[in-house]
Structure formats: structure tokens, C-alpha cells
Image (cartoon, rainbow, N blue to C red):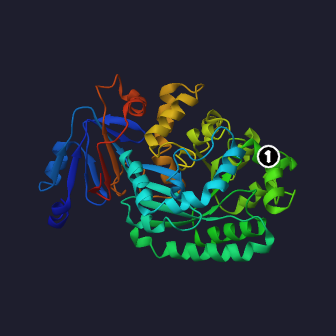
């Protein structure tokens, strides 16, 4: 029997369907305060927690663990029609041309609105990739929990110490915000843009302090050509901006540099099957951003290969510099339509896992699944009609949900 103190703060939610152990079940309710305390029938939970408030839900309601969006750039949230889409290098040129204006116009109000957009789609935790640290204040105020990836960028040895020092300052600032829901983390921008000396320092630090590690990896054909042949669109880029025609590393060197600690690698569209298999063997994972990849002309990540080889991947929105919304539900729909070779209900099921249990496991989060002892982070939604089967709920969730009904974080309704 629960204590009287527990009863005062206990709630019971009673959905039609509950996402449990990667399947959907009926006739179960969840008792929770800040954490999940029990999962049982409504009758049993009311007996166990007689003073708990019961939140009965509409017909065809579905209770999910809170969704996790692992890769977001908030600092470009002001962009709508400024940047050029269709191919990676013209897009990058437009980012450089408009960067100062976009960043200066992206104030806290704009970034908070971006956080709310994620929240409305059920996201209770997100990974913020931060180049300058300007998002930190917003990330401490948004209701969501935030993996705050302090990003390293800079390929020139002459500036390596200065850039690393700036990174350490930003990392320490994020460490001071743990009580505000911040999880300090490290991001290496990409193999082509970070000097190997700095990469090794960052990886060693991630290992020493057990910090989550992320990196953009083989996003575009231009990146692959540069790292393997020192040709293609990046040749002119590096000649114009850095007066060099030499890449600082190779694909193989960068992959082997990651052997010390698991990394969450974003995009990997241009990775070969052999490279993906190598990364999988070393315990790495992939962040899949289908809409960003399409808008920048990067190609399609063959997630059927990941599924076949049990390589963990998440589905993420990337930022508004390469997307039109930060809705994780919009991203799932795009992925569902893109990957036509995977049976559709199987794909829907894997995609739901890619924003719940998979990222939680990758980053050792106390969320992502509905289980006793886990944080009471929930995304609650209602289907428009009775699903044809329990197995079809994931598919119909992706097809028919534009906004969730309620979001709970640590047991509190926040949306």
C-alpha cells in the first residue's frame, strides 16, 4: 500500500491503448507522480492508490512515453525562405551568406516558439546542437529535458587551442544548468570541419566524463568526395575560405578515432554498407533526418540496412535551417513515405521506437518507455477512429496525428 504522502501527489491515467514493450495493450492504466509507480488495471490501481486523481481519457486514446528528438539546431529557427534548398553546397553557401542575420534575428522568443512546436508534437526531450551557446538560456526555461550538445568546429591547427578553450567554457556553463533539465554533451561538427587534434581531445573528454557524443557524418556526396578524393564542391569551399586543398582527415581515420566512445552520428546518408557495419560493431548509432536530407539533396539513408543489421537509429528533425517544421510527427510521416521497401506496419513500429526506447537507450535516459521507475514523461493522443488492429496503431498514429492532446514531463501536464 502506498504511503499517505504518495497518495497526495499520485495520478492515474486511463487510456484506451498503452504503448508497452513496443506493443499496444488495452485495459491498462498507469499510476504516477514524478515517476511511474505502477501499471495495472484501473480497478487495481484505484484500490492501491485510493486518493489518487483519475484522468479518464477519450475513446481511442493512446498513451506513449514522451517522444525524443535527438538532433535540433535552435539557432537558425528564424529561417523560413532565406536559405537555398536542393543541393548541399548552394545551401551551405547561403548559410554562410545569411548566417549573421539569421542568428541575430533568432532571439529567445523565436527559439522558445521552436521548443513549443516540438512540445506540441509530443517531444519531452530533445538534443540541441549548440555552436555558440546562445540557446542555453531558452533550454533551461523550456519544459523539456535537453541534451545540450556543445559543438566544436574549426579545421585549422593555428586556432585549435582557442576554439577548444571556447568550447570548454560553453561546456562548463551547461554543466551549471543540470538542475534546470540540461544534460551536458559534446558535438563534433563533422570530420571535414574539425581538426583531428581537437577531435581527439573532445573524444577523450567525452570518455573521461561519460558525456554523450554526437557528430555530423557523411551527410552529402560533396563531403564524401572531399574526404576520400579531395575533390568536389568542398575543394572550392576550402580554397576560398581557408586557402587549402587538403582535407584534415579521411572517412576511415575519423571512424577509427571514435573507437574510444560510442557516438550518435547524424545523417550518414553517404556511408557505405561496410562503413555502417563497422560503426555498428563499435557501438555507434545514427540520427536519421529524412526531410533535411531531401531538402539539401543529400540522398536517402538506407534504413532497411540498419533494420536488417539491428543498428540503432533515431528519427530527428534537424533544425529549421533545413526543415519546415520541428514536429517529430511530421518527420515520422516523411520517413514513412520515403522508405518504400520496408513493410509499412513494420516500418511504423520501428519509427515509433526511434523516438522513444531507442534514443533513451542510446543516451541512458530514464525515459522512453512506460515502466515502473521511469520518469513520468508521456505523449498522449487520440486517434480519429477505432484502429483496425492493435498492430496498426503505430501506423495510424503517424498517419493521423498532427498534434498530441497532452504532454506530461515528470508527472506534470506541460501542454
Q: Camera-side residue: 37 or 90?
A: 90
Q: Is residue 148 left or right of residue 296?
A: left
x and y percentages locating residue 130 in the rendered image: 56, 63
Rendered view: 202 above or below 400: below
Write down the residue under mark 1.
233
Q: Position of residue 200 (x, y in %)?
A: 73, 68
Of residues 315 and 107, the one nearer the viewer is: 107
Residue at 16% of width from left, 60% of height from top? 7
Image point 39% across, 29% down: which residue? 396
Above or below, 221 relative to 147: above
| The residue positioned farthest toward the top in the image shown | 388
From where the camera sits, is residue 271 visible? no
Counting from the top left corner in percent of width and height, residue 152 is at: 66, 65
Whether residue 378 sits left or right of residue 345 in the image: it is left
Indicate the position of residue 192 as horizontal and vertical percent values. Answer: 76, 56
In the figure, residue 157 lies in which quadrant?
bottom right
Q: Image height check: is 76 above or below 17?
A: below
* Image-quadrant location for residue 64: top left
Q: Nearer the viewer, residue 286 or 83?
A: 83
Q: What residue is at 35 percent from the left and 58 percent from the top? A: 373
Is the residue marked by circle 1 packed among few (<14), some (14-19), or many (20+) residues within 10 Å?
some
Describe residue 120's horizontal placement relative to residue 269 as left or right: left
Mark 1 residue element: helix
Asked whether residue 348 appears in the rendered view, the answer is yes
Please state, as top left, top right, bottom left or bottom right, where the N terminus lies in the image: bottom left
Amino acid at each position: 500500500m502506498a504511503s499517505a504522502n504518495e497518495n497526495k501527489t499520485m495520478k492515474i491515467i486511463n487510456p484506451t491503448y498503452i504503448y508497452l514493450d513496443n506493443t499496444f495493450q488495452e485495459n491498462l492504466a498507469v499510476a504516477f507522480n514524478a515517476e511511474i509507480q505502477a501499471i495495472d488495471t484501473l480497478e487495481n490501481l484505484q484500490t492501491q492508490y485510493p486518493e489518487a486523481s483519475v484522468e479518464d481519457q477519450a475513446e481511442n486514446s493512446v498513451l506513449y512515453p514522451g517522444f525524443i528528438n535527438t538532433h535540433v539546431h535552435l539557432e537558425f529557427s528564424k529561417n523560413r525562405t532565406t536559405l537555398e534548398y536542393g543541393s548541399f553546397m548552394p545551401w551551405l553557401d547561403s548559410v554562410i551568406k545569411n548566417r549573421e542575420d539569421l542568428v541575430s534575428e533568432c532571439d529567445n522568443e523565436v527559439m522558445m516558439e521552436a521548443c513549443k512546436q516540438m512540445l506540441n508534437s509530443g517531444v519531452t526531450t530533445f538534443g540541441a546542437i549548440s555552436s555558440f551557446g546562445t540557446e542555453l538560456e531558452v533550454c533551461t526555461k523550456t519544459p523539456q529535458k535537453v541534451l545540450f550538445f556543445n559543438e566544436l568546429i574549426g579545421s585549422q591547427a593555428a586556432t585549435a587551442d582557442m576554439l577548444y578553450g571556447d568550447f570548454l567554457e560553453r561546456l562548463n556553463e551547461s554543466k551549471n544548468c543540470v538542475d534546470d533539465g540540461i544534460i551536458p554533451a559534446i558535438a563534433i561538427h563533422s570530420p571535414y570541419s574539425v581538426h583531428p587534434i581537437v577531435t581527439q581531445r573532445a573524444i577523450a573528454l567525452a570518455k573521461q566524463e561519460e558525456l554523450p557524443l554526437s557528430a555530423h557524418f557523411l551527410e552529402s556526396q560533396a563531403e564524401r568526395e572531399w574526404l576520400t578524393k579531395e575533390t568536389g564542391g568542398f575543394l572550392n569551399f576550402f580554397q576560398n575560405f581557408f586557402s587549402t586543398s587538403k582535407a584534415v582527415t579521411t572517412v576511415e581515420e575519423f571512424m577509427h578515432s571514435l573507437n574510444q566512445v560510442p557516438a550518435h552520428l547524424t545523417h550518414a546518408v553517404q556511408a557505405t554498407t561496410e562503413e555502417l557495419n563497422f560503426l555498428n560493431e563499435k557501438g555507434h548509432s545514427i540520427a536519421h533526418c529524412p526531410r533535411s536530407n531531401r531538402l539539401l539533396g543529400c540522398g536517402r539513408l538506407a534504413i532497411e540496412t540498419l533494420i536488417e543489421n539491428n543498428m540503432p537509429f533515431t528519427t530527428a528533425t534537424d533544425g529549421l535551417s533545413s526543415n519546415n517544421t520541428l514536429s517529430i510527427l511530421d518527420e515520422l510521416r516523411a520517413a514513412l513515405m520515403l522508405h518504400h521497401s520496408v513493410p509499412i506496419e513494420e516500418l511504423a513500429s520501428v519509427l515509433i521506437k526511434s523516438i522513444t526506447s531507442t534514443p533513451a537507450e542510446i543516451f541512458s535516459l530514464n525515459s522512453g518507455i512506460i515502466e515502473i521507475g521511469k520518469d513520468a514523461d508521456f505523449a498522449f493522443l487520440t486517434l480519429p477512429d477505432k484502429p483496425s488492429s492493435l498492430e496498426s496503431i503505430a501506423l495510424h498514429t503517424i498517419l493521423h496525428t498532427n498534434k498530441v492532446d497532452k504532454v506530461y514531463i515528470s508527472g506534470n501536464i506541460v501542454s
